[in-house]
Structure formats: C-alpha cells, structure tokens
Amino acid sequence: MRTFTSIIVLLFYIACSNTNHAKELYNKALTRYANKDFEGASTLCLESIKKADLPDSYLLLAKIYFFTNNSYFEKTIEKYIRLTDSSQGYILYARWFIRNQKQDQAIRYLEKALLHSPNDPVALYLLGTIQYANKQYDDAIITFHRAFANYFPLMQIHRQLQEIYSEIHLPERAAKHQAILEAIKQFDDSTNGE
C-alpha cells in the first residue's frame, strides 16, 4: 500500500513539474512572439505542449500559424477549441475562414463565439463586416450598433456604419458616424504622448 501511495505522489510531483516547466516555456514563447520571432516562439510553444497540454500554448501557436499562413493552423486551433471551447478560438478560426473566402464557415464560428460572449465587439464587428459585404444592410447596422455599444472607440465600426448609411442614402446618420470618427481620432491624438 505504501508503495502504491509513493508512486501516486511521485507521479503527481512529475505532472506538476511538467506543467510548471511548460508555463515557463510558454512565457518565453510570449516574449519571442512580442519580438516578432515567430520561429523561436513556435519552437517554444511546441516544447511547452510536449510537457503539458496548456491551452495558452495552443492559442499562441495558432496565432503564429495564422500570421505566417502555416498549414498546421487548423489542426492547432481545433485542438485549442477542444480544450477550451472559448470565443477567442472561434473568433480566430473565423478570421482564418474570412481570409480564405469561406464566409459561411466564418459566420458559423462567429455565431459560436457570440453564444459564449454575446457582446464580444470583435465577433460582432467581423459578423457585421460580412453582412455588409453581402449587402445585408439592416443586419449589418444592427450588428455594428451592438458592437459599438460594447466598445464605442472601435473606429472601424463607425467607419463601416458611415459607409452603410451613405450607401443607403441616410446622410444625417452617415455624418453622425463621421463626427464620431473625428472625435475619436482627436481624442487619440490628444492622448498620445501622455
């Protein structure tokens, strides 16, 4: 019985040790990623994943693969989604589909993201952009308004709304969003350097 207990304690210690080492590797990968050393960051992420199945390592690796257009992106983001079922993974996967002109799949993943985080401004912005591109103006307007209600200073939302209102001949509303854009830009310019 003592031998069995000793083995369990030893295995637990090894597992904790591997997780801590994996986190250290992940943190080093983050630094490399911030310095745009994608190759070094991806190597450290892969080492981290070998030590322990850290979801953060999969997400960072997926981001690297996304930005470098690596063919392992889908496999990596799917693993991250299986581990976490998070809106962040769904949004990144949707961006991949948008980039690859697969709007139906992008919409499906954005809808999954919005099930988890109904007010996520990035998911709403991306969905609104697809709706706008498909000339679904009413849906796009509603989606963009939901997005800016949750993150007012996102300039792209106001830019898209200004364009939609111009296209559907509502110049007063277009002017309102143009004024918001200018106010945000002035605010950003005045706060730079503080």
Image (spheres, helix red, strand yellow):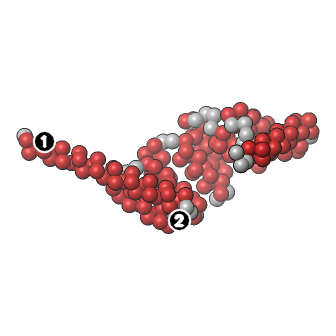
User: Which residue carries the number 2 mark?
Assistant: 37
Disc 2 marks which amino acid?
Asp
Which secondary structure, mark 1?
helix
Classify 137 as above or below 69.
above
x and y percentages locating residue 134 in the rendered image: 76, 47
Which secondary structure, mark 2?
loop
x and y percentages locating residue 146 in the rendered image: 71, 34
x and y percentages locating residue 33 in the rendered image: 52, 59
Disc 1 marks which amino acid?
Thr
Residue 72, which numbered label?
none
Q: Residue at x 89, y 43 (%)?
A: 166
Q: CA distance from mark 1 to mark 2?
A: 44 Å
For the N terminus, the quadrant is top left
- Residue sitting at the far bottom: 39
For the C terminus, the quadrant is top right
Q: Residue at x 44, y 54 (%)?
A: 27
User: Which residue carries the number 1 mark?
Assistant: 5
Mark 2 crowdedness (10 Å alpha carbons): few <14, some 14-19, many ≥20: some
